[in-house]
Amino acid sequence: MRRGSFILLLTTGLLVLFAAVLLAAGTPAAADEPGKPRPLNWTPGRITGTVSLGETITRTVNLTVSQPITGPGSVVRPKRFQESITVSGLPGALEPGTRYPVTVTVTVPSNLRGRAFNLNVFLQSDGENRVIGPPLKVHLKLEHPARPPRAAKSGK
């Protein structure tokens, strides 16, 4: 009986230690701290609408940054939609405190399935692999053609 109690106590202690390590690793990053400016700010932060398959929409958003970014480029996630979106109007360098109008053109793939088209647009500095966020969110509802009514079933 003593051996079983010791093993139970040891296992419980290890689980508590493991949980403490996980909680300590989950502390917020410096950009999430209150009072610290976000690296990017998109206004508006989301593009929404209702579109049909194959349709192209164009929206203008304003971008401000809190840190200089050289050679900015757009990165789309999920990656498979990189060819479906064009971001134009980004200059060769972004400076803090300046508002940049950016034109976003989205073409909804004609072979898309589902009820919505969702993606995120991040910025990436020239020569870096990491993306800079928060992203511009694109959420477009898909308008499907009306389905023909079902044929009436004969009565029993």
Image (tube, grey):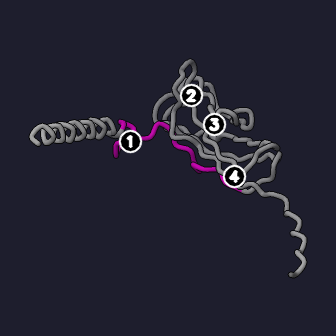
Q: Quadrant of residue 107?
A: top right
46 drawn magenta: yes
Mark 1 or 3: in front is 3
Report the span colored magenta.
29-49
Q: Which mark is residue 124?
A: 2
**Sequence order check: which comes first, mark 3 or mark 2?**
3
State how far apart marks 3 and 2 are (Cα): 15 Å
Mark 3 or 2: in front is 3
Q: Pointer 4: what residue?
A: 116
Q: Amino acid at mark 2?
A: Gln
Q: Give the x, y percent position of residue 132.
A: 51, 32
Q: Amino acid at mark 3?
A: Pro
Q: Residues within 10 Å of mark 4 (few under 14, many from 20)?
A: some
Residue pushed farthest front? 1
Q: Residues within 10 Å of mark 1 (few under 14, many from 20)?
A: few
State how far apart marks 1 and 4 are (Cα): 29 Å
Q: Which mark is residue 32?
A: 1
Mark 4 or 2: in front is 4
